[in-house]
Amino acid sequence: MHQDANAEAFGPQLPKTSELLQLLASANNRVEQMTGRLAMCKSGLERYGTDSSKLMIYTRFSSYNQFTGFFHWMQPIAQQMAYPYSAAKPGLSLGGTMLLALYDEPFLTLCRLHAGLLEQDLADRFNCSVSTVSRISLASINLLYVVLGSIHIWPSSEATDKHMPAGMKASYPKVRVKIDCTEIFTQKPSSLLANSQLYS
């Protein structure tokens, strides 16, 4: 009777050190699992931007700083763009939606263009619909056309003549540029006209 009164006075017995260590190991294991799941839930630049080799695979940019520098250069124009086929909503992301961060929209498009990822794959990776991927891609490609198309890339005829190999200068004295064509695989459009325009 006297011992029961003392036990009640001091409260329940504390767990042993070994039990605490087991609880701690279990908690650490759960934290690692949740961290892994969180990493899988991340998409776009947040997931791949810290790994330069992956960023190169998906976008052809060699570093996170290079990609973000390019993004910040075109951001003022990107904020004014709108999605094709949807009503413009000022103050929102690249086409009037907050589904993706603004920097993820050109990242998604570069994954589509450079890595050749399909729209369904990108929809799964970025947790959005296929139609959203399509609208983002069209808007970003238009943006890249406007921004990059304004950069003067062609050398003057004097510079071309100065650096042209002698053999080429003899055979083609008026040439300004030599283009190396690359095949890009695309999804087959349902429209016959659009499909015919994809042939070489």
Image: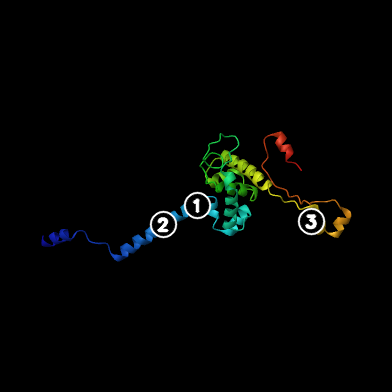
Mark 3 is on which residue type? Ala
- Residue 126, labelled with which disc? none
Mark 2 is on which residue type? Val
Front residue of 163 and 106: 163
* Upstream in sequence: badge 2 or badge 1: 2
* Upstream in sequence: badge 3 or badge 2: 2
- Looking at this view, name the residue that lies furthest to the right: 170
Question: To which residue does mark 1 refer?
Answer: 40
Q: Tell me whether circle 2 and circle 1 mark residues in contact (CB < 8 Å).
A: no
Q: Residue at x 57, y 57 (%)?
A: 65
**Left or right, residue 194 beside residue 95:** right
- Looking at this view, name the residue that lies furthest to the left: 2
Q: Comparing marks 3 and 2, which lies closer to the viewer?
A: 3
Above or below, 199 against 160 in this view is: above
Question: To which residue does mark 3 refer?
Answer: 159
Question: To which residue does mark 2 refer?
Answer: 31
Q: Position of residue 174 (x, y in %)?
A: 85, 51
Q: Residue at x 65, y 44 (%)?
A: 146
Question: Counting other residues with Cα less than 10 Å from the Cα at mark 1, is it few (<14), some (14-19), or many (20 or more)?
Answer: few
Quadrant location of the N terminus in the rendered image: bottom left
Front residue of 171 and 192: 171
Q: How far is mark 3 from mark 2, CA to CA?
A: 61 Å
